[in-house]
Image (cartoon, helix red, strand yellow):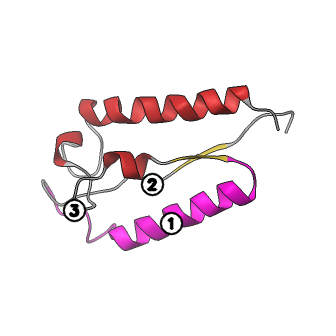
Amino acid sequence: ANGIRVVLASVMPVSDYFKPQTRNRPMEKIKALNEWIRAYAVKNDHIYVDYFSALTDESGLLKKDYTYDGLHPNSAGYDVILPVAQKAVDQALRSER
């Protein structure tokens, strides 16, 4: 579409450190959806932004330091997301379709 690059982002991880979040948002489903989004992006020559990997801890959950409720990022979480998003935007602006 007029040389505009599509940027698709992963679903962010959740955790149960503050409130139970994984019961309604199972990590297996989030990981499966992220893999589908990534594969779709690759197949269609879109850019994929992996917030999930940037925000997980050693247990594979949303790192406690990056959230206030286990679902939404806090300021520290956004500080991690920003350079990941900026890299994808820069890539989209540099490349032509």
Residue 49 percent location from the top left of the image:
53, 45
Residue 93 percent location from the top left of the image:
69, 26
- The residue that label 2 is drawn on is 11
Q: In the rendered view, does 48 fall on the left or right side of 57?
A: right
Element at badge 2?
loop
Please report whichever mark, 3 or 2, sits nearer to the chain's N-terminal start. 2
Q: Residue at x 50, y 34 (%)?
A: 85
Q: Residue at x 26, y 30 (%)?
A: 75
Amino acid at circle 1: Leu
Q: In the rendered view, does 23 fall on the left or right side of 13?
A: left
Q: Gap in Å between the C-alphas at discs 3 and 2?
A: 17 Å
- Decide: few, some or many residues near mark 1? Use Cα within 10 Å; few <14, some 14-19, many ≥20: some
Residue 33: which disc? 1
Amino acid at circle 3: Ser
Q: In the rendered view, does 48 fall on the left or right side of 81?
A: right
Amino acid at circle 2: Val
Q: Gap in Å between the C-alphas at discs 1 and 3?
A: 19 Å
Residue 8 percent location from the top left of the image:
60, 47
- The residue that label 3 is drawn on is 59
Magenta highlight range: 19-46
Residue 72 percent location from the top left of the image:
30, 45
> In terms of image quadrants, where is residue 73?
top left
